[in-house]
């Protein structure tokens, strides 16, 4: 709150203006104090900011990983002889075929409620991909730190 001038008002209109100004300043001060004491709102703001930062960092890291993986794949592909490439392509085709067969068996033999739960879980994972990436990244970093500490 600002200091009031020590001049005495000369008339009722000036007195009203000073009272109104004081009310306005007091209202602003009360609003500021109320905002400072609203711990829940401040925590939510900080959590939202952290979530946004984590999402941005996860997106940045995901982009970097994709670039590095593509570079590594091109490097490996350039260095591999053709017979190895052919065998790898054939093996990949066999793996895809087996995966399709396994999916069909799962669809045919799994009970409906279990299939529904599995579908819901997969959908939740796809919907919350950023959160899962951030959580798994944090878990890996924590594991590495704990592992490093254990070696000392």
Image (cartoon, helix red, strand yellow):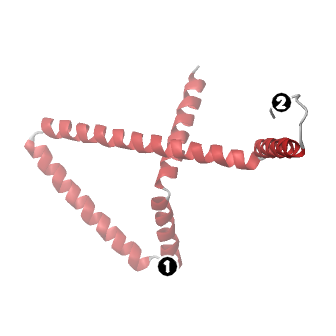
Asked whether 24 or 134 is in front, the reply is 24
- Mark 2: secondary structure: loop
Tell me which corner region of the image, top left, top right, bottom left or bottom right, holds residue 42: top right
Q: Which mark is residue 129?
A: none
- Residue furthest left as drawn: 82
Q: Is residue 89 above or below residue 8?
A: below
Asked whether 138 or 98 is in front, the reply is 138
Q: Which residue is mark 2?
A: 3
Q: Residue at x 23, y 41 (%)?
A: 73
Q: Residue at x 49, y 80 (%)?
A: 112
- Residue furthest front as drawn: 11
Q: Is residue 47 above or below residue 109?
A: above
Q: Residue at x 53, y 71 (%)?
A: 117
**Residue 109 location in percent, x, y?**
42, 78
Asked whether, in this view, residue 101 is left or right of residue 75, the answer is right
Q: Which residue is mark 1?
A: 111
**Residue 79 location in percent, x, y?**
14, 35
**Residue 71 location in percent, x, y?**
24, 37
Asked whether 126 or 121 is in front, the reply is 126
Q: How many marks?
A: 2
Q: Nearer the N terminus, badge 2 or badge 1?
A: 2
- Quarter in which the C terminus is drawn: top right
Kindly check if marks 2 and 1 are in contact, taking CB atoms under 8 A apart as contact.
Answer: no
């Amino acid at each position: 709150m600002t200091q009031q001038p020590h001049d005495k008002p000369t008339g009722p209109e000036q007195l009203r203006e000073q009272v109104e100004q004081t009310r306005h300043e007091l209202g602003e001060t009360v609003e500021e104090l109320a905002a400072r004491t609203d711990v829940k709102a401040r925590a939510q703001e900080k959590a939202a900011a952290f979530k946004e930062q984590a999402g941005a960092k996860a997106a940045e890291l995901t982009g970097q990983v994709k670039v590095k993986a593509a570079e590594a794949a091109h490097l490996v592909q350039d260095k591999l002889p053709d017979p190895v490439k052919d065998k790898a392509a054939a093996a990949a085709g066999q793996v895809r075929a087996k995966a399709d067969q396994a999916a069909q068996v799962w669809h045919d033999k799994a009970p409906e409620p279990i299939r529904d739960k599995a579908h819901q879980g997969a959908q939740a994972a796809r919907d919350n991909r950023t959160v899962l990436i951030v959580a798994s990244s944090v878990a890996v970093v924590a594991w590495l730190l704990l592992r490093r500490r254990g070696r000392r």
